[in-house]
Image (cartoon, rainbow, N blue to C red):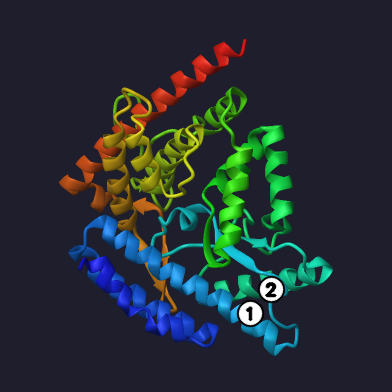
Amino acid sequence: MSEALAYENNYAGIRAASSPRTLRAARIKEQSRLLDLFAAMPSPDWNHAVNQMHDEVMARCAYLAEKVLEVEGIGVPPVPYAFVAFGSAGRGEQTLWSDQDNGLIIGEGGGERAELYFKYFAGVLVKILEKVGYPPCPGNVMLSNAMWRHTLTGWREQLQGWRDELQWEQIRYLNIASDMRCIAGSRELEREWKEAFQEVMEPGEALTAALLRGTVRHKAGLNVLGQVITEPFGEHAGSFDVKYGLYMPLVNGMRCIALQYGIPETSTAERLKQLIRLEAVPGLGLEACRHAFYTTLKLRSLTSYTVYDGMLQGSSYLTPSMMKQKEVKQELRESLGTVKLLYRTLQRQLRFTERKGL
């Protein structure tokens, strides 16, 4: 049995938590255990264990929110629902510290009662998540925002509206939606939502061009001389931003290609697996991209963090001292080189697509 699978037997405290306070304590205990296991586990296994812990905590938050509404006399959910995650949570790529990126799929037929119930439920759940250590999403991608809380019919209409527009903002929303994964509730609603998403995202030249334009804006943190770009001044002077200099460019690039091929998987690892199976994008070096991805997961876990009230508060920066380590420096440069090649490939594809559209 792998360390990751063995670790999954340690969730009893999370599953038994009866309040946000006891759930927070259980999360702190499990994150400490995971920190102790970091050096002993392969990076993919450790990442899996971290995200399984988050799934357990967030699912328990949804259960506690339901109980709050029962105690307050509002009752039980009038129709099935799916509490879903986007962002790194949707991709199963969270670090030990994470904010909220979530939404809600609501079953049909509940009418005004369901609308009012889930509006209140969303507010309660967001507050419980915050108490348990997940701060609000800076971009307000949360189920308390009505844009990310719909019936299945409402979601279909919204997704189609974004596809019809294909401007920068709508492409951003489609990219966010493409990472959706169910955390708690109805798996049938998740399945139907994904079917609707796949229909809306039927590949086409206009969609391909829009996806590419929205992706190539981001660049790997490597200059024209092949040097790693670090922060020039401020509190992080000399540090490297792993999230925005390496991780997000890689994730965004692989998502862009996966959407063009109609791949439904939400995790970067699964997207890469399917792209390699399809022998997609000849000449890109997808195996190198997969190696860079797993290296990136490890580097994200090496970034600096602080502890406040028992909860980890992380940054996305590799410190100058960490970057001086020979292995880290070499892995970082190799991964950045792979991402730079990825973006050259995407830029060539964009130029070709735009010429075809003339």
Q: CA distance from mark 1 to mark 2?
A: 7 Å
Pick the front one: 299 or 112: 112
Q: Where does residue 303 sit, x and y in percent of width and height?
A: 33, 56
Vertical arrangement, residue 93 with respect to residue 28, above or below: above
Identified at 37% across, 79% down, the residue is 11
Residue at mark 2: 121
Q: Where does residue 129 sit, x and y in percent of width and height?
A: 56, 72
Q: Where does residue 254 sit, x and y in percent of width and height?
A: 42, 37
Q: Earlier in the sequence, mark 1 or mark 2?
A: 1
Vertical arrangement, residue 341 with respect to residue 171, above or below: above
- Please, what is the three-letter code of the amino acid marked with disc 1? Glu
The answer to whether one can see residue 229 in this image is yes
Which corner quadrant holds the N terminus?
bottom left
Vertical arrangement, residue 350 with respect to residue 29, above or below: above
Identified at 42% across, 59% down, the residue is 94
Residue at mark 1: 66
Identified at 61% across, 53% down, the residue is 192
Q: Do the residues under discs 1 and 2 have CB atoms within 8 angstroms?
A: yes
Mark number for residue 163? none
- Please, what is the three-letter code of the amino acid marked with disc 2? Phe
Binning the other alpha carbons within 10 Å of mark 1 as few (below 14), some (14 to 19) or many (20 upward) gives: some
